[in-house]
Amino acid sequence: MGKILKILISVVVIVIASLAAIIFTTDINHYKPDVIQLVKDKTGRDFSIDGDLELAFSLIPTVAVEGVTLGNAAWAGDTPMIRVSRFEAKIALMPLLKKNIQVNRLILIEPVIHLQTDSQGRGNWNFVTHVNEETPSSTETASTALPSLNVNEVRIEQAVITYKDGQTGKMTDLKVSSITANSAGFAHPLELVVKASLNDSPVSIDATLGSLEDLTNNRAWPVSMVTAIDKANASVKGQIGQPMDARGLDLDFTFDVEALSHLNNVAGATLPDAGPIKVGGHLADTANGYTVSKLIARLQQFELTGELSVSLAGERPAIKANLNADTLDLSPFQKEEKEEKNDRMFSNEPLPLEGLNTVDVDLGLHANTLITKSLTLNNVNLALVLNNGKLMVNPLTAKVAGGDVNINLSLDASDGKTARLDNTISIKQLELGLLPVMQKKNLLSGGKTDVDIRLAGNGGSVSRIAGSMNGKLLIKTGAGRMANDTVDLAGADVIFSALTMLNPMSEKEQFTEMECAVIRFDVKDGIATTDKGIAMQTQRINIVGSGAVDLKTEELALALKPVAREGLGVNIGSLVNAVQITGTLVEPSAGIGAEGALRAGLSAGAAVATGGLSVLAQGLFQKSTADENPCATALGEAPAQSAGSEQPEKKKSAVESTVDTAKEAVQGVTEGAGKLLKGLFD
């Protein structure tokens, strides 16, 4: 037994001595040109090693080198794709007996890696390999066979990785604390662990991938990966058929986060505090793009399902989606309204119209219930198409507060500079009293309302579009009960203040029984006018109004006059002469005054622009207004002058004729009416 042990010890000593002899007698720099040429052949890129190859002998010999550079793709500029300050390779002893290099661990210190794509989406990591067959062989080259190379583990420390999107120009910087890749061999699966930070948010990746052999040979490559970014988690599982080309995707994916705001640092923006959110689906590629099937997106207890595809074959990316939801809550994604003081309701800021020319969209959406901060909509159906800079909503239908909403909209920004807006909004039997803002203030009960808005305009900003509007607006409300006390209804308090001033019973009775109400405006070149087109009929008085809104300057000039209904016990002397609404859409004001005050409150420019509003107002007050059916008059269903009037019919002045020829609608009479309509679709 002792003799056998001595023999074994002798064998070990001989082996170690032999290995030492091989290592110390082998000039590892002898292989340096071959290594450089091998990398060039495998990548088609320039490759250089600035320092000598150093070999440190121990039980696990280590090769170290400084200053390694791998060139970039020809189209990517002069910046190297990879630059490494230092790398170390720990080499197994036993394979050296056969002059094979088995690298147990490869360590890269402070590498700088530049990744980028070109305008067609091609990445600089796609290598063009070649072998120069015309290179003459020398006696030295022929007698020196390049040893086989196998790497089991790669570790990267303190790396900086940049990525530039060649289509958008966006830059992303990633600081990597460490990347470790382990494999039993070139043909075995690869284990990958990454620890990094993105915009100071921790990032970790744990993955099991296919072999390097399959990757470099562009064969089917299994993928199983779990990623954590701050408090968000994502997973991908499946395979990539042609990994070097990023083709043949067959991947299931999931993403979840407690709240989107947890990703503020990563996104570089303030995201809504919405969550928890979970998204999953199956990703595959097509001949022209990508598809996401079995899509499921959950926000809290709400779920959105459907399919999504992206085509890259045309001049612009084309996105097509068909989505369905039982209940969809958008309120967490809506910004809180800030009490900002603006001079104008319609912004003068140029619209980002060029964005409509960067992508095409075909979206179909159905939701049984759609929740927003201000409204709940039912049976929502949306068909939206964006093609070549022209946005079409045809249609958007929904049920709101018992009414049916139908919207058709066209916004043509195909030239990228100005937009042509055409829209039709039809609302039938909307019960105003059921709107949340009305219920909250207990302002109105009943009040079934029809709305008909037809507008057209063009310009490069909302203000210019509004200032060029042509069309009409008609709001017709049925019977309802209205609270008499003035309330602050998102700016509409001006309107209700005016009604309170006109109603002699407002201080004696809690409610006013309204039989009907009408607002009708015609619009031409941004000037909205109405001649007795504002009307309200109550049990005791009728209210009739006329005036104009200049959408270019946003100036208001409206007059409302009460008329007592005969036999209902209202003292005519208790009625105010008139209430005028002046100011602007942003700052309207209501006050008691006669036609002279109204005329004085209107600027000369606005008076000219509106075709002589003062003449129109004066005509209103001079005529008999004892109209038993003012709502019908406002609708154009009855003569403008009562049959009982003693005033002979007068020939219209040129100014009045100009006013009468104004066509088509305005989006609001005052800030209150505008915001009330706007609230339907916020």
Image (cartoon, rainbow, N blue to C red):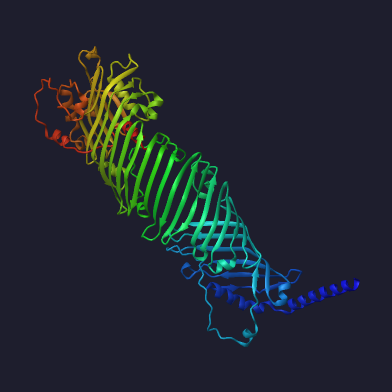
Would residue 551 appear left or right of 282 to someone viewing this image? left
Q: Nearer the viewer, residue 573 or 302?
A: 302
Residue beneath the point at 74% across and 78% down: 22
Task: Quadrant for residue 463, please give it.
Answer: top left
Mark count: 0
**Relative vertical location of residue 73 with respect to residue 424 in this rendering, above or below:** below
**Relative vertical location of residue 605 with respect to residue 294 in this rendering, above or below:** above
Residue beneath the point at 28% across and 16% down: 504
Residue beneath the point at 70% across and 79% down: 27
**Relative vertical location of residue 643 with respect to residue 145 in this rendering, above or below:** above
Task: Quadrant for residue 595, please give it.
Answer: top left
Can residue 682 be spotted in the picture? Answer: no
Q: Nearer the viewer, residue 33 or 556?
A: 33
Can residue 406 be spotted in the picture? Answer: yes
Question: Where residue 609 appears, x then y in whole percent?
Answer: 21, 38
Task: Quadrant for residue 567, please give it.
Answer: top left
Question: Where residue 487 appears, x then y in whole percent?
Answer: 37, 24
**Direction bottom: furthest residue:** 139
Indicate the quadrant containing the N terminus: top left, top right, bottom left or bottom right.
bottom right
Would residue 58 appear left or right of 181 to someone viewing this image? right
Would residue 154 appear left or right of 113 to someone viewing this image? right
Would residue 150 appear left or right of 486 to someone viewing this image? right
Question: Where residue 618 appears, x then y in whole percent?
Answer: 17, 26
Question: Where residue 359 appears, x then y in whole percent?
Answer: 38, 54
Indicate the quadrant containing the C terminus: top left, top right, bottom left or bottom right.
top left
